[in-house]
Amino acid sequence: MGTRLGQRQILLRTLPPGGPGRKAMSSLRVVLGDQLSAGLSALADLDPAHDIVLMMEVAEEGTYVRHHKQKIVLVLAAMRHFAAELRKRGITVDYVALDDPANTGTLTSEIVRAVERHRPARIVATEPGEWRVLKMAEGWQKATGCAVELLADDRFFASRAWFARWAKGRRGWRMEHFYREMRRAHAILMDGDDPAGGDWNFDADNRKKLPATVATPSRRRFAPDATTRAVMALVERRFGDHFGTLAEFAWPVTRAQALQALDDFIANALPQFGDYQDAMRADAPFLFHSLIAPPLNLGLLSPHEICAAAEAAYRAGAAPLNAVEGFVRQILGWREYVRGVYWTLMPDYAASNALEATRKLPDFYWTGETPMRCLAQAIDQTKRHAYSHHIQRLMVTGNFALLAGIAPHEIERWYLAVYADAYEWVEMPNTLGMAVFADGGKMASKPYAASGAYIDRMSDFCGRCAFDVKQKTGPKACPFNYLYWSFLIRQKQRLAGNPRMAMPYRTLAAWPADRQAAIVSEAEAFLARL
Ligand code: FAD
Ligand code: DLZ
């Protein structure tokens, strides 16, 4: 399973062109902004006497989508701290800063400049996490005339090849099947051959509404140090008109901080993570969630150590099984699964639009100005923290995009832009596959469509909303209500045959045609006003 340290899988190797002026066996080792792991394959056999690590801050990576300002600060601040740590270990780092006057603004053009500066015998890199950047890396040999060795990214439980083998020949892919194999293969939460506690899945225990009397824990956050503050000023100067604010930036930017964040989660939030995993509360953006995706996706933590820490808490009696299994399922299951889906189905996956949705993304996704309180809350938290938790992403902003028929590419680019943890390999399948069902069911067995009743059940948003969640039609009715039924009517041909959608379609079948038509026209009128 996966590629192990010491047996690195080489994905691409080209012959060194040789030629005068090249130092014997010196390697230029590229570390990208989301590859900040000491054990990175590109750094594995680094020779500090001859090799140089290249890190590049480039405008293109901040603007190919207009990332939230906090995301750019997080990546650049973490890169600067990582470079400092490498230097402390005696490694030479050639670090190209964003405001270096000679900076040409793209990864490839900076690699070309670096090869001219150092004349290495070869470039060594770990495969990028994103299709777009992988295609760039595959062009580096041609662009530089220098040999390129592209190594597998072994910071995951499942290698791309392993997932492809698992997926091949299966009629339908389901996360649950994948997850069970991962539990077995990695002996995580297993008692011999059986799952700990006798069950693979404790989801039924994990859907509680959060009572007003239950307090949420205060969380370990990190005040920006001088390095991060300098990056914040730089980002305000260069990307000042991007979405979001920096005032509350408090993400971990070093491995030491990321470990403190993990310890804090395990001790203070994990025990109730399961119970309230799906809950939403207006004044509590983080609830019992781990906040671990931003440092994890940068490489400051490994999924292996996170799962081990959670399992250790269970074995020590410090956290119940429904919480620990629910958390491990997210990391060992969903995170690995969506990566496999991404790499197996790209590049065609990006153009998925099974429901033929074409509506433009409403402006309120950027401004937060909407009378729908659940959406306004989720977007406001996103602006302030570059974060909202999974149920807000899936059942509020995602559900609205699904029901309103927003073009998948528009909503997909929004998710990629606005979250501190957003990288295409994880964001795209979650958006196209899970939130808006644009892949027609490759990733999830049914659309996560819901009316206002779901949001009301799981949150305290509806009480003070301008709309009334109990009303199904009329000017005060919650738009999620008529949008939900109108969506089912619109998509009947595609969805009515899905056994998991049988219940709502049975309800709909009992409605007279004029009632259905009235709902559709009310939804259309609302959407036209957006
Ligand atoms: P927790 O709720 O504490 O979960 C623990 C960890 O499990 C997360 O840190 C993450 O690493 C992993 N995880 C949980 N759910 C998923 C999932 N569905 N897919 C992959 N990993 C998961 N996650 C990202 O890391 N980057 C993204 O760009 C991203 N985009 C998303 C877009 C949409 C439309 C949706 C519905 C989900 C998206 N997710 C994404 C998944 C999930 O919402 C975030 O991982 C989670 O909210 C991050 O917060 P947390 O660290 O507090 O997570
Ligand atoms: C997200 C990001 C940003 C904002 N800036 C940089 C950068 O300046 N230099 C860099 O190496 N990486 C950056 N990144 C991360 C890349 O976009 C990321 O490596 C690709 O998306 C591949 O996952």
Image: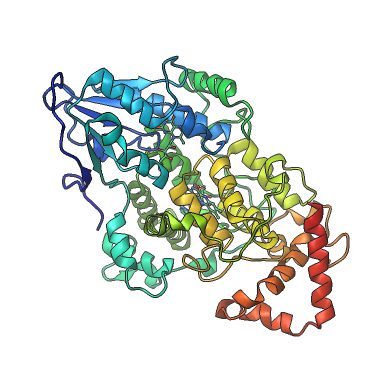
Residue displayed at 59% across by 45% down = 414
Q: Is residue 187 visible?
A: no
Q: In front here: 216 or 258?
A: 258
Q: In this view, does 508 lie above or below 382?
A: below
Residue 199 image offset from top left, x and y in percent: 40, 72
Task: Name the residue furthest right.
Answer: 475
Q: Quadrant of ligand 2?
A: top left
Image color mode: rainbow
Relative depth, front residue between 238 and 501: 238
Left or right side of 322 for 520: right
Relative placement, left or right, of 244 versus 374 is left
Question: In this figure, what is the number of numbered marks?
Answer: 0
Q: Taking 133 as reference, is 437 left or right?
A: right
Q: Nearer the viewer, residue 376 or 116?
A: 116
Quarter in which the N terminus is drawn? bottom left
Whole-percent x, y for residue 470 in the image: 81, 66
Q: Outermost residue, left direction?
A: 24
As drawn, 385 above or below 462? above
Between 252 and 362, the residue placed more toward the observer is 362
| Residue that appears at 72% across and 81% down | 507
Query: Looking at the picture, how far across and down is residue 456, in whole percent?
Result: 72, 61
Answer whether residue 473 is visible to the viewer in this image: yes
**Residue 517 x %, y %:** 81, 74
